Amino acid sequence: MNNEQKKDLPAGVIGEEALSASSYWKDIARSFCKNKIAVVGLVLLAVIVVLCAGAPLFTSYDPVLDMNPSENLLPPGSEGHLLGTDDYGRDLWSRLLYGGRTSMLTGAIVAIVSAAAGVVIGCVSGYFGGLLDSLLMRFTDIMLSFPFLIIAIAIMAALGASQKNVVLALAIIGWPGFARLTRSQVLALKEQEYVESARVAGFKNARIIFNHILPNAMGPIIVQLTLAVGNAILSAASLNFLGMGVDSTLPDWGVMLNQGRNYLQTHSYLTTVPGIAISLTVLAMNWVGDGLRDAFDPRLRK
Amino acid sequence: MRIYIIRRLLQMIPTLLIISFMIFGLLYLTPGDPVFLMLGAGESQSISPETYEMVRKDLGLDQPFFVRYLNFVKGAVTGDLGESYVTRQDVFSEIMARMPATLQLTFCAMLISVLVSIPLGILAAVKHNSIWDNISTFLATIGVSLPKFWFALVLIIVFSLKLGWLPSKGIGYLEEGLGTYLSHMALPAISLGLGLAATQTRMIRSSMLDVLGQDYIRFARSKGLKEKIVILGHAMKNALIPVVTVFGSEVGGLLGGAVVTETIFAWPGVGRLIVNSIGKRDYPMIQGATLMLCTLFLLINLLVDICYAGLNPKIRLEKK
């Protein structure tokens, strides 16, 4: 909202400023912090993000270029290589950290893109209703009725393997869930009196949707977003594992698993290490998501 | 009830049309000339213009996009999905030859999931906030977070490579004896089924918790009914209804997971066929197999919904 609008509408009259939003979020944060598992998840996630984002600080090896054939397939705990080396003699710890960047970035972008698309479609559908709503929701339902990984694989087969296409394929499958969720929230909220009064005050539809309805619908959307990041990491790992995802020279957890597969018998740590990394990240994400869900649930919040 | 089933069958038609259009459209946009793929030649190699035109006409590639799509749909309805670029075999019969393997794997995974999730979910809800609840919730959250294909690899490392108990590759046929059949089925079905079981356990637990708080449960207890009867007779039936509805869509995840599982365990099913065909750029095969898996998914969903309608008197007794 810009300053001009503030001038002709005194604060506190319509309700945008009257309700103290800060105490609501403080309540959520307080109830989230009471949930031990959720806090553990958040801390775990923070550690993983810091390690991966600051990868150059925690390792001196390049994940792709530092090949050393004379030191290949060293087991974890070898001198100079905390987690050992892969078949090209590259440091596994370094590949793990840089790989986390690819995996988590992919997960986050997929979740944000699907959420953005789904929220816009859900808002339009729920707020305006009518024929547009019927058409959009029929389409959403059909999209939801696809076996998603199979469609993702078909999309990847058509578009070709690249990180951009992984994001695109997973976002195409991801948005309908957000659209359904947002629509149901908007439907419930648009009948509320404060929305009615905003409409009477002559506010534009866009302003009512973004300033009045959406902030109150954010809770479930944030929860869904958190869980979607974890799911996207898992799906992207599946695609990369099948060799249909990112360029196999990029360090990525799914790609690492695919490479480690050839050494199951002799060097199983090449498979277990990236797998544990994916599992821990997604587990932390799910714990945070579950904690947020409980925190946003007024029935559970005291 | 019959009208309900017919209505649901009719509703499948637009969904299938959109799926087939998406898949057909996607593969249409793919770079690469099908004629060269069909002739198994690189584009640099010289193919006489006559041969090129002949194959092009033969494949129907000289026609506009929508005519080709309509022909594809017309063929699909009669079970003709074209022929493979690579093996020149009929796509439909190739897929149907692999369908039983996929169906068996999916069915065993579903069975495992049901056998694990129902007792665990109910136990967690009945002993709410106890150590049992915490353990089963913890296990379920871990199960949801593990990449299923990685879990499959870990199972291979432990049970095939280290302990040598179970085979890590291929399918065992019933003719070779039940032992061979089950030992080959064990690892793929467990790795696929436990993932689904994790999701299901969480759902059954919360649904059961909801039901246990209802008045009729309190009434049943105050009547002095045995706790066992209250839980297994009254609560479970109602708690499973919402779980059944979601079960159908979970099968979609199962079929998607089967693609990866089949690849890992060299399981001769439709999923592995898709992955192999993508490697060979065999587009008619990718198109056909994807469409068939989507159809299978819709049919399973329909079946689940019919069971649901049978469970739910609101729909069962509907006159219309």
Image (cartoon, grey):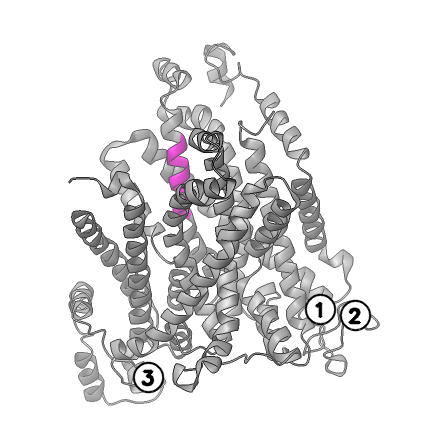
Q: Are marks 1 and 3 in contact (CB under 8 Å)?
A: no
Res. A249 image quadrant: bottom right
Q: Which of B137 and A177 is in front in this view?
A: B137
In space, the residues marked 1 and 2 are separated at their CA atoms by 7 Å
Amino acid type for the residue under numbered disc 1: Leu
Query: Is B181 displayed left or right of A133 in the figure?
Result: right
Give the secondary structure at mark 3. loop
Provide the residue designation for mark 2.
Answer: A81
The magenta segment: A175-185
Q: Which chain carries label 2?
A: A
Tell me the residue at 36%/39% (across/down): A121
Q: Can residue B140 be found in the magenta stretch?
A: no
- Marker disc for residue B86: 3
Q: Is residue A166 above or below residue B40?
A: above
Provide the residue designation for mark 1.
Answer: A92
Does the magenta stretch mainly form a helix, a strand or a loop?
helix
